[in-house]
Image: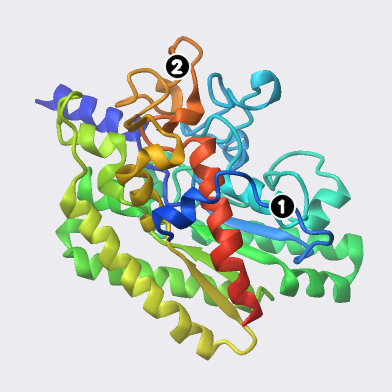
Amino acid sequence: MVGMATSKLFIMLAVLICMAPINTCSSAAASTASMATRPPSPKFPAIFVFGDSTVDTGNNNYVKTLFKANLPPYGESFPDHIPTGRFSDGKLVPDFLASFLGIKDDVPPFLKPNLSENELRTGVTFASAGSGYDYLTTRLSNAIPVSKQVEMFKSYINKLKGIVGKDKGNNIIGEAVVIISAGTNDFVFNFYDIPTRRLEFDIVGYQHFLLQKLEDFLKELYELGCRKMIVAGLPPIGCLPIQMTAKFQIPTNRKCLEDQNSDAESYNKKLAKLLPELQAKLPGSKLAYADVYEPLFDMINYPQQYGFVEIKRGCCGTGIIEALFLCNAMTPICRNPSEFLFWDCIHPSQQAYIYLANYIIEEVVPLFDK
């Protein structure tokens, strides 16, 4: 019994969900098959990113953790198939946003050594795969929790002001677009698959616990000068391939888990209500909600409209258990990752991220002009 429990814990650690990216209907999303056009001049001077593996472009390469994606076949869709530490076959939403907004081609990780002054001026990501709002989430993964990512941001601010000066540094921070994507790890790792938090919370209580953590985080970013922030909701957690696998669904008859999807929807409603209330308390702030649930669920329900042929398993290996180090150079992959909604059993493919980034550009970013 002990060996079986240890084995199960190891497997769940290996497949810790690192996903809570960033609404749309099928017709609107289907119209965004091509990438957004880069504007003639940047709308924002920089982009700052916080969260989990959906927005970690490589910080975990420099962290002592099992949660890394710096090995093949990750990066399969990058030029020369280079694994950069991104948990996908290619780029992530922040990379596409930075490009679409005319800021730069991609967003480097803050922990990358020898970042150029221009890279620092135009923004970085502080995200860490395996992280969450709840400190328990990173206890086993050793990822950088969202709360500690603020400390990295403070260090960044000092570096930035050392390059451009205090006044210009403050202006860059105040005018930059901030992306926050986290939360799924908290529910999966602490409530569903390893139910530690269920000993003290019901689902509603845990939702409120996490939302309070998020509110505190947003207030701290505000105190540091951030004003324009986009906060992503939860995806349809019950449709992630690994979650269907965790319920021992057979590969030929897999269905989304309705209870987990319902929990994600109720959390998102609370988050969407919280943000305008908090914005009213923070003068000069703009807090925009990005609903990842609806666009991803639409891709699942109408895959043909997006060019997907597979939505219940990932491209890597069998697609039902492979992620992190289980998706490696010895693992076979699908012929065309762009036809798969998921790259591994947890994370969306680059093609799915393109749709999400287009949605944010078309539906969320314009909210800052209102």
| Vertical order, 37 against 325 (above or below) | below
Location of residue 183 by image quarter = bottom left
> Which residue is nearer to you in this view: 110 or 247?
247
> Helix, strand, or loop for circle 2?
loop
What number is the disc on residue 333? 2
The x and y percentages for residue 309 are 37, 29
What number is the disc on residue 37? 1
> Helix, strand, or loop for circle 1?
loop
The C terminus: image quadrant? bottom right
Few, some or many residues within 10 Å of mark 1 (<14, 14–19, 20+): few
Residue name at image x 22 percent, y 31 percent: 245
The x and y percentages for residue 65 are 49, 34
Q: CA distance from mark 2 to mark 1?
A: 31 Å
Q: What amino acid is found at the position of numbered circle 2 in the picture?
A: Ile
| Vertical order, 316 against 87 (above or below) | above
Residue 150 in sight here: no
The x and y percentages for residue 156 are 74, 58
Q: What amino acid is found at the position of numbered circle 1 in the picture?
A: Thr
Mark 2 or mark 1, whichever is nearer to me = 1
150 relative to 260 in the view: left or right: right
**Dot placed on the residue nearer the N-terminal end, 2 or 1:** 1
Residue name at image x 20 percent, y 49 percent: 195
333 relative to 70 in the view: left or right: left
Residue 234 in sight here: yes
Q: Residue furthest top?
A: 330
Residue name at image x 42 percent, y 22 percent: 316
95 relative to 268 in the view: left or right: right
Location of residue 182 by image quarter = bottom left
